[in-house]
Image (tube, helix red, strand yellow):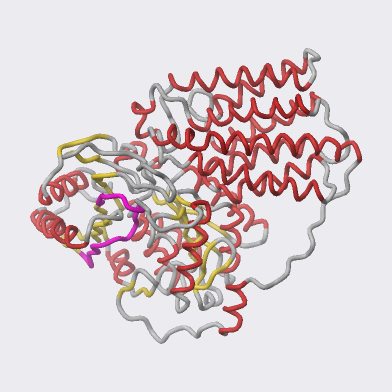
Amino acid sequence: MTRLFNDPAAFADEALEGFTAAHRRWVRPVRGGVVRAAATPAGQVAVVIGGGSGHYPAFSGLVGRGLAHGAAVGNVFASPSARQIHSVATAAHAGGGVLLMYGNYAGDVLHFGQAAERLAADGVETRTFAVADDISSAGPEESAKRRGIAGDLPVFKAAAAAAEQGLPLEEVLRVAERAGARTRSFGIAFSGCTLPGADHPLFTVPEARMAVGLGIHGEPGIGEEALPTADEAARLLVETLLKELPEDVADPAGERAAVILNGLGSVKYEELFVVYRRVAALLGDAGVEIVDPEVGELVTSFDMAGISLTLTWLDDRLEELWRAPADTPAYRKGALDAAEPDLDRASVTAAAQDTTVPAAPVVPAASEASRGAADTVLAALDAVARVVDAHADELGRIDAVAGDGDHGIGMRRGSTAAHRAAADAHGLGAGAGTVLTRAADAWADKAGGTSGALWGTILRSLGTALGDRDAPDAARVAEGVTDASAAVRRLGGAEVGDKTMVDVLVPFADALAAATAEGLSLADAWDRAATTATAAAAGTADLLPRRGRARPHAEKSLGTPDAGAHSLALITRAVHGALLDHH
C-alpha cells in the first residue's frame, strides 16, 4: 500500500514538486509538468510525453537529453489535461514542431488530441502518437485498441533519438510509428496496487494464484493461473510474445530485439534478475539476439506486485536509436557529447517558484437576467460536487470491477474544481454561460482522464447554449443538453450500447427535449428526464463494454453498472433538487 502521503488529492502535485527539487540538473517545472533544464536546441523537434502519476519513472523521469524534451503529468492514474499538455509543449517548443506521445488510453487520446488542436491554432506544427503495445488488451486484428504499457520507453526513445539527430517532424513521427509497430508487451501480477488514501487495493489475486494480462492502471488481468516459479513465469512471458511477431518478421531466429523486463512496483530487482536469466536463455534458444536489455522499474503501477516483458524487434535504424545515449533522472545510457549549457539559475528558480502575479480575472459583460440564472447554475454545481463527494468511494468500487478504480477520485477532483471556479466567476458578476464555461475548464483541467474531458465538454456545451445575455428558458437548457450529448459522442466516439456514460446521456437528453416540447417547466421536465437517466444507468449492468479500459475485462463487468453512467444519473437527480430550490 501507499503509506506516505498528506492529502491524497494533493499527492500527484506534491510528488512532482519533490521530483523537480531533487533533479534540477535535468528538469525544471512548468505549469502542467516538467521540461528539460536546458532549452530545446533551436529548430529541434520537441518530443513531449505524458500520462498519469503513479508510474514513475514514467513520465517525468524520462525527460532529459536523448529522451523527452518535456512531460505532462496528470493526477494519479489520470491523463493530464489538454491545458497541462499545451503548457508543457509550449515551453518545450523551439521552432521544430512538437510530437506528443502517450499510452493508448481514452483519456490520453482525448486530451493530447485537444492539446494538438490548440497548438496548431497557435501556429505550432504538431503530431501525435499513441503507443499500443499490450497484446493482452486486444487481438492482432484490433491492435489499434491496445493499451500502452512498458513499450512506451523504446518507442519514446526511438523518436527522441531521431529528434536529437535533427530530423524533421514528419520523419520523427515515422520513426515512432515504426518502433510502435514492432513493439509488444505482456504482463502478470501477484497483487493489485493501492492508491494514496485508499484502504484496499484496486484488485486482489487469490493466494497461490497470479493475474495474467494486467494493465498499468490497476486493471485486473484477463485471467488467472496458478502461481508460477520464476522460470515458469519467464517461459509464459517469452512464449506469449513469440506467438505474435511483427508482420515483417517471419521467424524470430536471426532477429534482434530490445528487451525490457519491467517491475511494476514491489517486485524486487533480485527477483527480476532471477526471471531475466531464464528470459535471456529462452530468447537465445529461439535464435533472438538481445540488444542492450533493460531489467528494472521502467513503468510502474504504485505498489503492484507484477512484471511485464517487452520486445521491440529491431532493424538497423531502430537499433541505432535504441543504442543512442541518453541522460535523464531515471534512465541513462552511453555517453553524450559536451553538456548543453544550463539555464541561468535565477531564471530556473523564478520558473520553479512561479512568482509572477497573474492579472486580475475579468468576465464578459452579462445581463441582469443571466446573472440571476447564474445563481441557479452555481447552486446546481454545488449540488453536483456534494453528490459526487458523497458517492466517490462507491464510484471507485464500481469502476474497479473491470477498470482502474479512479472514477470517484477523478469526479471528486473535477466537480470540486468546477464549483470553485464557478463561484469565483459568479462573484465577479458573470452570467450563466460564463459561469458554466469557467467550470468546464476547471473540471477538465483538474480531473484529467476521460471523465475530465467529457464533463468539460458537457459543461461547455451548456454554457455556450445559455450564454450571458438572457435568462435561459427550459427549451434552451434542453437544447444545451442535446448539444452536449452530440459533442460527447463526437469526442469520445461512444454510442448507446457501448456501456459508457453515453447510455445515460442520450436518453436523458432525449427525455428532457421531449418534456420541454410538451410545455413542462424546467424543474418538471428535468425530473422526468432524471428518472429516465436513473433507469438507463441501472440498465448498463446488463451490457458488455465495447470501449475504454473495461473492454478487455468485459465479462467481469456484467452485472455491474458503468461507473460513468451511474455518476451521471446521480448528478441529474442532484441537479433536480437544486432546480426545485431555485424554482
Residue 299 within the segment the image draws in magenta: yes
State yes or no: residue 501 in magenta.
no
Q: In this rendering, is residue 135 above or below 344?
A: above
In the drawing, does residue 427 fall left or right of residue 455? Answer: right
Residue sticking out furthest to the right: 368
Residue at position x 40%, y 60% from top? 58
Place residue 141 in its image quadrant.
Answer: top left
Nearest the camera: 135 or 516?
A: 516
Residue 323 pos. (x, y %): 29, 70
Question: In which quadrant is the C terminus drawn?
Answer: top right
Task: Residue 464 in the image: state x and y as whole percent.
Answer: 76, 39
Would you say 454 lies left or right of 279 here?
right
Residue 168, visible in the rendered structure: no
Where does residue 60 sit, x and y in percent of width and height?
45, 64
Q: Which residues are magenta?
A: 291-308
* Residue 139 can be seen, yes or no: yes
What residue lies at 84% left-to-right and 41% top-to-bottom? 468
Quarter of the rendering containing residue 295: bottom left
Residue 404: give x, y in percent of width and height: 41, 41
Residue toward you, 180 or 153: 153
- Compared with residue 40, is residue 461 higher up or lower down, i.e. above or below? above
For the image, the number of numbered tags is 0
| Residue 443 against residue 546 in the figure, above or below | below
